[in-house]
Image (cartoon, grey):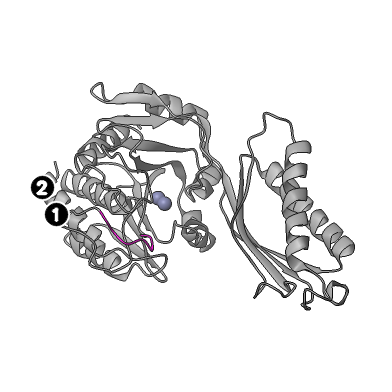
Amino acid sequence: MPDLKTLYDIRQSLHKVPEIAFGEVKTQEIIINELKEFTSLVLTRFEPTGLLYEHSTGEGEYILFRADMDALPITENTGCDFTSEHNGFMHACGHDMHITILIGLIQYVVKNNLKKNLLFLFQPAEEGEGGAEKIIKTGVFNKYKIKSAYALHITGAYKTGSIAVKQGIMLGIPQEFNVEITGKSSHVATPQKGIDAFLAGMSFYQEMMTLIAKRFPAQEPILFHIGKASAGTVRNIIPETCTFEGTFRCLKTEVKQKIINIMETVAESVEKSHEVAVKISFLCSYAPVDNDENLTNHFVKNIPADIVLHQAETSMIGEDFGYFSQLFPSVMFWLGTNSTEDLHSSKFLPDEKSIDVALEIYKCILQQD
Ligand SMILES: [Zn+2]
Ligand SMILES: [Zn+2]
């Protein structure tokens, strides 16, 4: 049984040094330091900051547990006494908790010399930089036969002592994109000499919203969103450029491809009708988190009796554990933690007691699986 006070201390140390995608250097150091006494573990490192610990006790299949490591460029406003020492950065998505839970699990496994083949992945860059995909592409998992993979994400939506899970797609596909429209500037008094990129941008956005509404069944969940737009320079000049930063969300790969096709078709049409150039860049995207039916059933049946189980809703939040769920039978679940604030809020401060709850569940998986 790990010393939970120590785990709380580890969590506080991690919380103080939030680091963003692929910059998790101090975070990595803390993890390595906490686990260095466990010399039976085989460590594989991934550039720049990923860590995979292997606990093998003979031939056979492996179970993979994954925790993400990165923080966010948000200024902490929790007022807690272990607040971020990195100005402008914060563990606002609770990945400090995820790391701590995995460290606690490893301590338990090694100290009890558990006769199981297990992999523990500390994964960098979950927040929009695709850390999971990068590690999978190294081929590191090809040498293992992995029978199941598990991850959790803390949430303020449920109380400490409760979790939520669902079979099938629990978290959707996010696809980030930029749109750059180039026209020609001219004085407002001579509109015939210019090409208004802003006007073209409005057409693009309007046409996209119309087609998203018309090309899919009403029950197909899709979000198409532009969160940042900019155009023009001054009041009386026709804008030469218009740029959008946006994201769309859906649940199926084929729907994602269809939306991309529609965007490209609309871009061509706007180019012709407005005589502008439209460039679309498709940026980060994740696979959906698709919980395996049998594994989730098994997981749910074996939840310890003192833990409250909720049926999770399908959410349009993206999580790059999705890539693991495409490769191995997987379960990801929400871990309740008393917080009135949402994930990514500058006031998000999860209850450290949910570390104990997560460990109870993970240990139960190890006893059953
Ligand atoms: Zn997040
Ligand atoms: Zn997160």
State the image coordinates of residue 95 (x, y, percent, origin top left): 33, 52
Seen from this angle, which residue lies furthest front? 189
Magenta residues (range): 71-77
**Relative depth, front residue between 56 and 9:** 9
Q: Name the residue under label 2.
A: 5
Q: Is mark 1 within 8 Å of ligand 2?
A: no
How far apart are the alpha carbons under marks 1 and 2?
A: 6 Å
Q: Which amino acid does label 1 sit on?
A: Asp
Which quarter shows the N terminus? top left
Label 2 packing within 10 angstroms: few (<14), some (14-19), many (20+) = few
Q: Chief secondary structure of the magenta span?
A: loop
Instruction: Give x and y (percent) for residue 314.
Output: 52, 33
Q: Which mark is drawn over residue 118?
A: none
Q: Residue at x 49, y 27 (%)?
A: 294
Report x, y in % for residue 176: 60, 57
Q: Is residue 141 visible?
A: yes
Depicted 78 relative to depicted 153: above or below: below
Q: Quadrant of residue 81?
A: bottom left
Mark 1 touches mark 2? (CB < 8 Å): yes
**Residue 76 vertical position relative to residue 2 in the rendered view, above or below:** below
Q: Name the residue under label 1.
A: 9
